[in-house]
Image (cartoon, grey):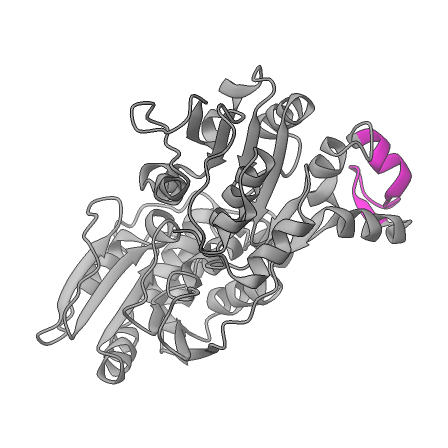
Amino acid sequence: MINLYDFQIKAIEQMKNGCILCGDVGSGKSITALSYYYLQNGGDPDSLQGGDYIPMGDPPKDLYIITTAHKRDTLEWEQEMSRFLLSPHSEVNLYRNKVVVDSWNNIQKYVNTYGAFFIFDEQRVVGSGSWVKAFLKITRRNQWILLSATPGDTWQDYIPVFVANGFYRNKTQFLQEHAVYSRYTKYPKIDRFVHTGKLCALRKDILVPMDFHRGVQLHHEEIYAEFNNRAVKELWKTRRNPWTQEPIINAAELYYDIRKIVNSDISRQVKLLEIFEDHPKMIVFYNFDYELDILRGMTFGDAEVAEWNGHKHDPIPDGDSWVYLVQYTAGAEGWNCIATDTTVFYSQTYSYKVAKQAEGRINRMNTPFKDLYYYHLTSKSFIDIRIRRAYEEKRNFNVNKDYKRYYGEFKMTA
């Protein structure tokens, strides 16, 4: 049975070809997008509000879903499609149409597709690379919509979508009309955008917000751990890996080693255990393998400890006390958990979008909790402060740019 919420029905009524369906993680963008496809292909509106399922006209348009590799591999989209009797497997697909779920890495395979319906999930059409070029070719010949929790932070992020909608011929025309370049740099650098009233109107025309209120209160708390400042200063001075004594060759390695010193401090483990005393079921996100080694070595009493990372894909425990260790890159999306109200970030990720995806694992529409708790373990080290600042500004933290901004060109010896 399909029974959409009122805010999802409202969003469908506003959707059109070329729109961006914008909703927080866990708001049901997938089921809303499939419902829009269902209606566009002759489906019955009553079927979306608890009525009997009425099949679409056969065959409906071929359906292509371009998503993350993780969502493809965890079959998240296939689970949603089953409610519409759709499947990438022809033997169980009710219809004679073609259904494909694939990752952004393979988008080039579909540039010659014609007359189909594309759902671009967790949109990656930013910049002017191969994905954007393939996206623009596909949108000229097919119906399409985009799904995104974070549709764009700057006007440049919207250029491919504006071009795909026919608002501009190409990126060059957009920049000629709206970009003002700085006169004081050796390379082209946009100083500001003009005629932003027009840009706001165009963005409003294609953005379809999913306005919903779960009635859930989110509690974010920063927990400060100590760190060995003397070791950090020594590392900065010598520019040598303190574990191998080999010279550090670039800013990325320098920042990685500093983070290892900061994140490995035993006080961070103590803080995690203190949180666990009050929250016996919790998800713990981490970045690096050395952090996993630390977490594996901790004692959580009789609690079951399970993992989701590049090495193991354990299911979420279902006992009265458990800890689920999740690596950001492997497990920030594609699953959800409504059995706990607590997520702990043992360390911070450089990616704002990954952080928001990770927060969404427990923030689901069907969560039984009225309060959700997010604990951010951090420190007063310069690296943690700057990563946190980037998150608050809704941007990614870039190691090379940060180093160059504060210290100039990297040197192997200070």
Q: Is residue 122 visible?
A: no
In the displayed structure, does residue 251 sit left or right of residue 332?
Answer: right
In the displayed structure, does residue 203 sit left or right of residue 274?
Answer: right
Which corner quadrant of the image does residue 266 belong to? bottom left
Give the residue drawn at x 33%, y 47%. 330
Q: Say how many tags the image has.
A: 0
Q: Is residue 52 one of those drawn in magenta? A: no
Residue 249: give x, y in percent of width and height. 43, 42
Magenta stretch: give its range.
172-192
Vertical relation: 361 (above or below) 282: above
Give the residue drawn at x 50%, y 29%. 63
Residue 148: give x, y in percent of width and height. 57, 49
Which corner quadrant of the image does residue 347 belong to? bottom left
Q: Is residue 55 visible?
A: yes
Residue toward you, 269 or 363: 363
Give the residue drawn at x 52%, y 57%. 352
Residue 72: give x, y in percent of width and height. 37, 37
Residue toward you, 36 or 365: 36
In the displayed structure, does residue 247 sit left or right of residue 198?
Answer: left
Residue 353: give x, y in percent of width and height. 51, 54
Residue toward you, 71 or 115: 115
Give the residue drawn at x 77%, y 52%. 204
Q: Is residue 190 one of those drawn in magenta? A: yes
Q: Residue furthest top?
A: 112
In the displayed structure, does residue 230 sit left or right of residue 322?
Answer: right
